[in-house]
Image (cartoon, helix red, strand yellow):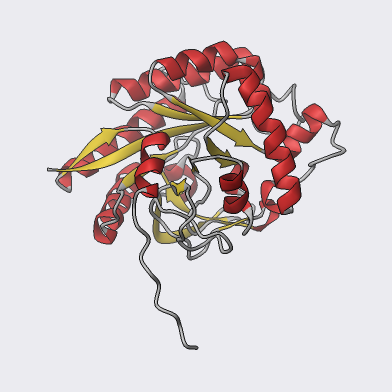
Amino acid sequence: MQDISVVITMDCEPSTATSHPKATGPRDWAMGERAVTGYAEIAKSYGFPCTFFVHPETILAQADLFRSLEAEGHCVGLHMHPWKYSYARYDGKRFRCHFGDLAEADATALLSEAATLFHEAMGRHPLWFRPGTFSANDSTFRVLTALGFRGGSISAPERVYRATRSVWTGCEPDPHRPNATFRQIAGDLEFGNMPLSADVSQVLIASNGRRMPADFRPDTDWVGQFGITYRSIAENIVAQVTARAPAVPVLNAISHNMFEYRDAADPFTQRFKEMLDEMCAACGRAGLRPVGTTLADVAERAIGVVPEEEEFAFI
């Protein structure tokens, strides 16, 4: 039986009292902690560690929590919504934008500040990164690599959220080394990017007009909103990864720290467990063994893959 890696991730946002009334996030730090610890315990019951991407305000407020989780074998990296950080640190007067809006110099300045705060909390430089809403531009991978990051989960295949500068049509769907100048293709940067797993057989249109495929997340009521089950999502994603046969096969799931994952009756908790059940069952039916790991492992494996030389297109 062939192994397939499973990476369970969570974006850990600042509390809404810390950022902006319209921001997503837990209502207070206690709720955020319940979400994080409940999520980790559920994932652990399936044999999976977690990868937490933590916003600077959150890592400062909950340093002991994330140090403890890291000591238990979970992976802790940096998360960033520039506009949330702007309201917390600059009263909305600097960096009030999405990550993909940032010019190279501004992205470098912002991440350097955030890395200093992360170091203050964790005692080390952050090595892993995910931008809020997967917002990025063609300088993003270059900036991250120059600042010493080893990997991240930067891309969401086929997502088109123009308002948040998250446009990933035609991008690489599996872990890879990114290109220094064009974010959609593989390259030779010393950085491992782990895209969000997505069922690319169908692009859905949300009520706000945003376009995205279904993915492994309990945040969305896929059945209620789109009539799509976790079974079909899991079956399709596993089949697509198997057909592509990448060097580093991965199932990458996502959620956020604003749901009551310690409450067994909460619908988000129930969807999370159903998602994991269906993910594992789909792997079994495909003759695959789901093996829990973290972004740290996947990124290093992706860096170790020699990129294929692309034939020049004479068009």
Which residue is at the front of the view, 24 or 74?
Answer: 74
In the orientation shown, which residue stands out farthest toward the bottom? 315
Q: Residue at x 45, y 17 (%)?
A: 69
Which residue is at the front of the view, 138 or 46?
Answer: 138
Residue 241 position by quadrant: bottom left
Horizontal side of residue 137 vs 128, given as left or right = right
Position of residue 283 relative to residue 208, above or below, is above
Q: Residue at x 34, y 44 (%)?
A: 301
Residue 18 position by quadrant: top right
Residue 26 shows up from this direction: no
Residue 115 location (% of width, % of height): 64, 31
- The mark total stands at 0
Position of residue 55 relative to residue 98, above or below, is above
Position of residue 225 relative to residue 258, above or below, is below
In the orientation shown, which residue stands out farthest toward the left? 1
Residue 78 shows up from this direction: yes
Residue 285 location (% of width, % of height): 16, 45
Q: Residue at x 55, y 15 (%)?
A: 33
Residue 256 location (% of width, % of height): 54, 31
Horizontal side of residue 74 vs 11, given as left or right = left
Location of the N terminus by quadrant is top left
